[in-house]
Image (cartoon, helix red, strand yellow):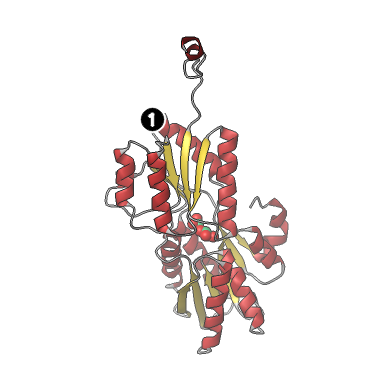
Amino acid sequence: TLVAGLFNPMWAGAAQPLVMGFSQVGAESEWRTANTASIKDAAKKDGITLKFADAQQKQENQVKALRSFIAQKVDVIAFSPVVESGWDTVLREARAAKIPVILTDRAVSVSDPSLYVTFIGSDFVEEGRKAGRWLLDFAKKAPNAELNIVELQGTVGSAPAIDRKKGFEEIIASNPKLKLSRSQSGDFTRAKGKEVMEAFLKAKDKKIDVLYAHNDDMAIGAIQAIEEAGLKPGKDIIIISIDGVKGAFEAMVAGKLNVTVECNPLLGPQLMQLARDVVAGKPVARRITTTEGVFPAEVAAKELPNRRY
Ligand code: GZL
């Protein structure tokens, strides 16, 4: 055993691969699929052992996953919290186990911000503002028209749903002709987005001029509902959405979507580097935001070949 021990890689100075526990929201949208692929690819390329858990958009599954990572004594925990609240207890357990936690994609609201080391993800309020600014410009072309807006919100209680609503309303408040008449959650999925849009259309109280969807998947579901109602998406009803997934570019090329605000899911490489720095005890920024653009239909055909997700 002594001889064998001498050849233990630990002794030979070979570092054990870093072990990351990652709890993912689910597989609800094209965005999420691209985000998962980026994380798995980056871990493989970086030689990081990834323990990956899909929570099917249920918080209790994420809490279970985090507890399992703690029990397995992983080196670092990273997760995308499905909703903002309800994380204090399990994050305290991670701290007690001296396992650093990195937030990716979505934020949490906790009593003690030191419960996580850093948060890498988009600025969702700014994404909502960008959607609002596009609509302000659009409304300038039809100055006198009052525009009746309906909104498909993301998952109730999630950071993107709360913040995208906040940013959009902050901007459109400057034009009293823009009226948000109905708003309901489509849970970021195509199926639910279609179902809620059908309900909006059936309400028949006021003609719908604009749909603001918190992600492309719900917008794509709504497009189906609009067509089934005999209306032209992108023309009879102007559609603004967020993510910038391939499906959105294809809908814009087909003239069925008017603009998508980019939300970059390709966080994998940055996350792996962050994890190494955190485990090595290096100082890291508390907040890392991703740079993102706005893609109106006019540029969709040119941009589509360049899209990486
Ligand atoms: C945003 C991310 C959201 C996407 C949706 O960073 O949390 O969740 O906008 C996804 O497509 O479901």
Q: Is residue 266 left or right of residue 66?
A: right
Q: Is residue 30 left or right of residue 125?
A: right
Q: Is residue 35 left or right of residue 275?
A: right
**Ligand 1 lies under 8 Å from the Cβ of mark 1:** no
Residue, far front? 1
Q: Is residue 211 above or below residue 131?
A: below
Q: Is residue 199 above or below residue 14?
A: below
Q: Is residue 154 above or below residue 32?
A: below
Residue, far top? 3
Q: Position of residue 177 (x, y in %)?
A: 48, 80
Question: SS of the residue at dot 1?
Answer: loop
Q: Nearer the viewer, residue 63 or 25?
A: 63
Q: Residue at x 55, y 40 (%)?
A: 269
Residue, far left? 111
> Disc 1 residue type?
Gly
Residue that label 1 marks: 281
